Image: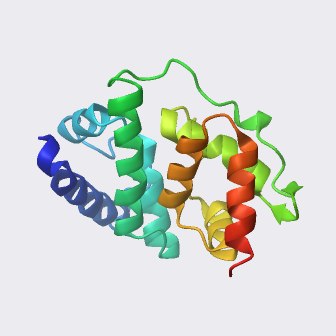
Amino acid sequence: MHHNYQDTLVRIWNDAVERYKQGHTKTEGFLDEEELGFIESIGMNLMDVFDFAEDWVCEGSPDLATFLLIHDARRDYFLREQDSQRSENQLDSSTLPAKTDEVQGIRWLPRIIPKARAKLRGELPPDTMFCCGGDRNFFQINNVHPSEFLRVVREAGENDSIIIDWVVERSSKT
């Protein structure tokens, strides 16, 4: 299943988008048991699908390619770093820096770093989405793709300065 997992993920995305368009706008029963089992086997959860389908239908972003790239980064982290074992931890959203916080003049950067780490580790709570509207605004302003940001965060480990320096440099090239 690993060599073509993306085919199943595309089918799940398409079905989720269609369900949402047809008025299934609650998480209860949004995915069937087979779909849930599959996404859990690659480190995802219900909200990873629901939030992206909802935002696509309501806002036209993020698109399927972005959904796939972000969740490929999560899948790779889950398989390689976590040895297919889910984290027992969950980010407390109330501990995230404020939406208005800045570092080196870049708004949202202090907030998105811990969100990205939590996304990679599968530790986002249901009320917090990586690549939400605020995140997408940050990515657009700073000329960064969300999956690219996840790779930089993964490579930097816990060293925020590497991430900050990278974003500052990238942002200066917009």
Place residue 44 in its image quadrant.
top left
Against 141, residue 51 (above or below) is: above
Camera sees residue 88: yes
- Residue visible at 13% across and 47% down in the picture: 3
Q: How is the image coloured?
A: rainbow
Camera sees residue 27: no
Q: Position of residue 84 (x, y in %)?
A: 32, 25
Image position of 21 (left or right of 138): left
Image position of 109 (left or right of 30): right
Relative to the observer, which residue lies in front, 34 or 75? 75
Relative to the observer, which residue lies in front, 117 or 43? 117
| Count of marks placed on residues | 0
- Residue visible at 16% across and 56% down in the picture: 7
Q: Quadrant of the N terminus?
A: top left
Relative to the observer, which residue lies in front, 79 or 119? 79
Q: In the orientation shown, which residue stands out farthest toward the bottom?
A: 174
Against 91, residue 11 (above or below) is: below
Image position of 65 (left or right of 154): left
Q: Position of residue 167 (x, y in %)?
A: 69, 62
- Residue visible at 17% across and 52% down in the picture: 8
Q: Position of residue 90 (x, y in %)?
A: 59, 26
Q: Quadrant of the C terminus?
A: bottom right
Q: Position of residue 40 (x, y in %)?
A: 31, 33
Place residue 78 in its image quadrant.
top left
Relative to the observer, which residue lies in front, 125 or 152? 152
Image position of 110 (left or right of 138): right
